[in-house]
Image (spheres, rainbow, N blue to C red):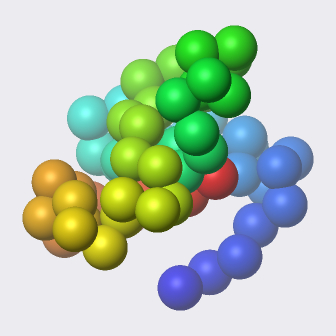
């Protein structure tokens, strides 16, 4: 696992094809509705353990 600040994450995403990475938003639905990164998948942190199978283990995942 690698940690990135928001600027590093943005730069990293710019180098990736959108189909080659999962952007995972772990905030609450209301926060997601108010704004999220394009293409982000919403799985609230409280649900992540039971929904982890929805993520592709072959792709890198950016979590915010």
* Relative depth, front residue between 37 and 12: 37
57 to 8, vertically: above or below:
below
Residue lying at 16% horizontally and 54% vertically, measured from the top left:
54
* Relative depth, front residue between 13 and 29: 29
54 to 16, vertically: above or below:
below
Indicate the position of residue 27 as horizontal and vertical percent values: 61, 45
* Relative depth, front residue between 58 and 40: 40
Indicate the position of residue 34 as horizontal and vertical percent values: 69, 14
Q: Is residue 17 visible?
A: no
Q: Say whether residue 48 is left or right of residue 3.
A: left
Q: Quadrant of residue 61?
A: bottom left
Residue lying at 22% horizontally and 68% vertically, measured from the top left:
50
Q: Say whether residue 23 is left or right of residue 19.
A: right
Residue lying at 36% horizontally and 59% vertically, measured from the top left:
47
Q: Quadrant of residue 17?
A: top left
Among all residues in the image, which is located at the extreme top? 34
Indicate the position of residue 42 as horizontal and vertical percent values: 42, 37
Among all residues in the image, which is located at the extreme bottom? 1
Residue lying at 31% horizontally and 73% vertically, measured from the top left:
49
48 to 31, vertically: above or below:
below
Q: How many marks?
A: 0
Q: Is residue 18 visible?
A: yes
Indicate the position of residue 30 as horizontal and vertical percent values: 62, 23
44 to 51, vertically: above or below:
above
* Relative depth, front residue between 19 and 41: 41
């Amino acid at each position: 696992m690698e940690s990135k600040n928001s600027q590093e994450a943005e730069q990293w995403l710019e180098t990736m094809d959108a189909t080659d990475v999962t952007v995972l938003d772990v905030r609450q639905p209301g926060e997601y509705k108010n704004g999220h990164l394009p293409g982000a998948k919403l799985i609230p942190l409280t649900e992540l353990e039971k929904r982890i199978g929805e993520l592709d283990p072959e792709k890198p995942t950016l979590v915010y």
